[in-house]
Amino acid sequence: MTGLYAADAASARADVGTAGASVTFTLAGQGTYDPLTDTTTPGADVVITGAAVRVKGNPIVYQRLSLIEGEAPTLFFTPDNYGDVPALDAVVTWGGIDYTVKSVDPIAPDGVAIAARVVVAR
């Protein structure tokens, strides 16, 4: 782990790991389409792991996404790997329910994410 805020990222990960729960965001491989052969080559899944805790959401974000906060939690996420953030449309299980990522707002003071606010919905 290198970068200006690597130590802060590790500290945040430890704190959120203690207060929250481990999570895994998975974006199923989209594959690559070849129009010459009319075939799609399967792609690898993108898996981002870390810890998350539910936090109060931003009403403006919910309005923009046409979501209701009670049905679409905002998670404060800290990645296991410095700089990782979940992709839009990735799937995560939170509280026993599968959700899809609708919004990601990274916290990246030097351009490398140390955490992110992630809005998920069913």
Image: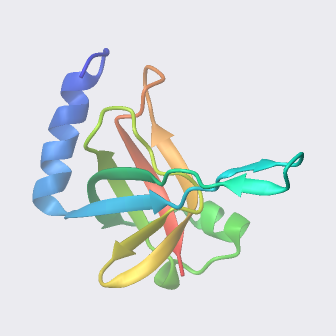
Residue 11 vs 23, above or below: the answer is: above
Is 100 placed above or below 77 here? below
1 relative to 55 in the view: left or right? left
Towards the viewer: 22 or 54: 22
Which residue is more in the foreground, 119 or 48? Answer: 48
Residue 92 lies, in percent from the top left, at: 41, 68
Q: Position of residue 74 (x, y in %)?
A: 44, 66
Say left or right for 115 vs 45.
left
Position of residue 99 in the picture relative to residue 38 (left or right): left
Above or below for 83 versus 32? above
Colour mapping: rainbow
In the rendered image, the quadrant that contains the N terminus is top left
Give the quadrant of the C terminus: bottom right
Residue pictured at 34% horizontal, 75% vertical: 94
Q: Residue furthest right?
A: 36
Q: Position of residue 102 (x, y in %)?
A: 59, 64
Q: Residue 50: x percent and y percent?
A: 27, 51
Q: Nearer the viewer, residue 14 or 24?
A: 24
Left or right: 2, with 100 as reference point = left
**Residue drawn 36% across the image and 64% down it:** 55
Counting labels gives 0
At x 43%, y 80%, the residue is: 98
Seen as rendered, the residue at the extreme front is 37
